[in-house]
Image (spheres, rainbow, N blue to C red):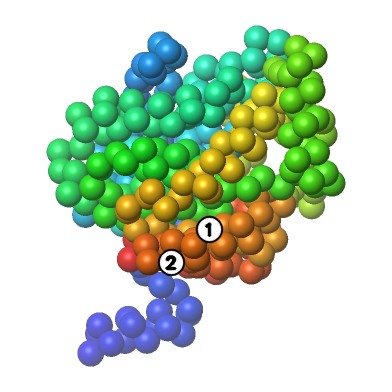
Amino acid sequence: MMFSLILTLFSILNLDPALALQENHLQNAWNLELKPFLLKGENIRFKTRDHLELEGIYFRNPKPRGTIVVLTGFTEPYLKYAELFFDLYQKGYSILGYDHRGQGLSPHLSQKNPQAAHCEHFSDYTDDLGFFMDEVVVKKVPDLSNLSLLAHSMGGAIALSYLELDHHFPFQKVILNAPMLSIKTDPYPQFVALSLVQFMHFLGKQEEYAPGSHAYDPEQPFEKNRVTSSRARYQLEHEIQKEYPSAWIGGPSNAWVEESLLASKQIRLHLNQVKTHLIMTTTGQDEFVNSSEIADSCRSIRSHCTLFEFPKSKHETLMEQDPIRDEVFRLITQ
């Protein structure tokens, strides 16, 4: 009788005890819950093939229902994922993540402008993930039989380039959130944008901001942001940024745009080499990646790719309003 009453109350209040933190709970969540939780994580440092030392974090659940490797998107530090890490941990998962080279707490690569998101070769990202899996995940995760991979945007492109190399990690689930399979280069077509950044490279300006890019603006108002329609989560990101300002960087360098345009095309061409079943999401208001290319790519391998579309979402579904974020959270944890 009491159990039925509780379920009825949850239904009336439109609450779901299985879901994550909600927007109306985020105002004080950074200081009361998320920051203390982050500080309890195990800090990880691992060296790459070219001897960079990348920064990561590990939350080991004492009774894990599984382990999730999280790959962040372009310019994102893992610190930005504090809410997601907290929610996944509360659901019983262990979590591992790291900051890609050139961003977050890992070494920034541009000598001329450390604020620019720069890389020399996109394949370096793929190699780094391989080292992370071999040197960190294998050694720290006691049971690899229930291992999942969750990747956002650029992280999704890195995940696919890694999987296309026929690595044999037993991922039970691979979720690619708005994967960077095709970059929006508006107002120019991609071939014009590529030619432009290649010309800048020829002039020796590969480390400078690509046309239209600039430094990170911590004062940018919510109304001008292009990634989320959740004011609460946008404000939470800025709270974290104020505490860790060096972890946030600006727009891409010419070299990053050149490498990423070339790499994303190759990833699309070799997508059928991925043997693991994929879950891909697209957003209807994405200003960074072409959702139609994601949908077409998933359908091209429909035998082992499932597509979920979120027409009301901007690029970052995991930072979106509760109804959208809750649905994505269900995809990850169901």
Residue 264 picture location, percent across and down = 57, 42
Q: Residue at x 44, y 39 (%)?
A: 161
Position of the C terminus, as image quadrant, is bottom left
Q: Position of residue 53 (x, y in %)?
A: 42, 15
Amino acid type shown at disc 2: Arg
Between 218 and 96, which is closer to the camera in this rendering? 96
Which residue is situated farthest in the left direction here?
142
118 or 43: which is nearer to us?
118
The image shows residue 94, relative to residue 249, as above or below, that is below
Q: Quadrant of the N terminus?
A: bottom left
Element at label 1: helix
Check disc 2 and report the residue beneath it.
302
Image disc number at residue 177: none
Closer-to-camera residue (45/154): 154
The number of numbered discs placed on residues in the rendered structure image is 2
Q: Quadrant of residue 207?
A: top right
Question: Which residue is at 41% across, 72% downward?
Answer: 16
Q: Residue at x 67, y 30 (%)?
A: 258
Whether residue 186 is visible here, answered yes or no, is: yes
Packing grade of label 1 (10 A; few <14, some 14-19, many >=20) is many
Res 11 → quadrant? bottom left
Residue on which disc 1 sits: 297
Query: Is residue 322 shown to the viewer in this render?
Result: no
Q: In terms of sequence position, does the residue under pointer 1 or pointer 2 come before the other?
A: 1
Q: Quadrant of residue 4?
A: bottom left
Spot occupied by residue 277 in the image (x, y as percentages of width and height): 34, 58
